[in-house]
Amino acid sequence: MRIGVFVDGYNVYYGAQLVCGQHSRGWKWLDLSALVTPRVAAFPGGITQIHYCTARRGRTGRPQSVDQDTYLAALTDHDPRIRIHLGKYVKRIKQGVLLGATRTPVPWPGPDVPDWLTARRVAGAEGEDETLVSVRVFEEKGSDVSVAVALVEASVGGRIDAAVVLSNDSDLALALRVARSHVPVGLLNPGPRPTAADLQGDPADGVGGHWWGRLSAQEYLSAQMPDVVGPWHRPADW
């Protein structure tokens, strides 16, 4: 069987961060093939393609950007089966109700609103006055779409005989349903949260032979590339 692997890069990154610990080391220099190979024993055959869908974070030349570029370059040098699909990382301004320490809405403070705070009074669900503020958020855009397109293209197009998807993003629900009608699909949840209900199904759906699993801290820690891959060196704090 020709096995295709489809990785939602940011979903895996933040899932691994929660599983391994945000400030821990030893999990970021991830060898995707080594991570998945022990899990594909249910599918006879081997991995023929790995799609890694992510977005570049931060401005070129910044430490985070340099580390990420180093990792992406090392990935493709280490494993020629890897294809990288890049989305975007964008800055947006959003509005939302301000929450206090107990995660309940902060009442409108009236004249006590500081001059520097962009805020206005809004009516809450029960008619109470709440405080609406503007915040800056950074969002990764496009990785889930890239995973969906690559998965559907490969499964419907007959380029693979089985698929393994690393994500817990419910936006992939339709793509997974389509893929399961053509090939067996294994879904690996990268983080500690329950697998999204929209991504679940029955092992007998479509062509059948589907399975679900969750990645552990030990799997992340043991699936690491060599510290030096060609000219690329693992970042010191990774």
Image (spheres, rainbow, N blue to C red):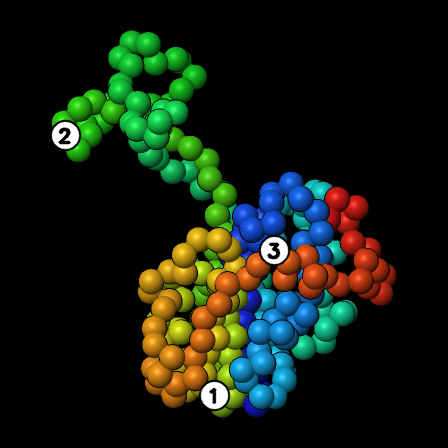
> Which one is in front in this view, the residue at disc 3 or the one at disc 1?
3
Looking at the picture, which amino acid does disc 1 mark? Gly
Marks 2/3: CA distance? Answer: 44 Å
Disc ID at residue 126: 2
Q: Do the residues labelled 2 and 1 touch (CB within 8 Å)?
A: no
Marks 3/1: CA distance? Answer: 34 Å
- Please indicate, yes or no, whether residue 94 appears anywhere in the rendered image: yes
Give the image quarter of residue 128: top left
Determine crowd level at label 2: few under 14, some 14-19, many 20+ residues with C-alpha closer than 10 A. Answer: few
User: Does 151 sit above or below residue 90?
Assistant: below
Looking at the picture, which amino acid does disc 2 mark? Glu
The residue sitting at 47% across, 88% down in the picture is: 157
Q: List x then y, in percent, for residue 200.
A: 36, 69
Give the image quarter of residue 184: bottom left
- Dot 1 falls on a residue whose secondary structure is loop
Circle nearer the N terminus (2, 3): 2
Q: List x then y, in percent, for residue 15.
A: 53, 53
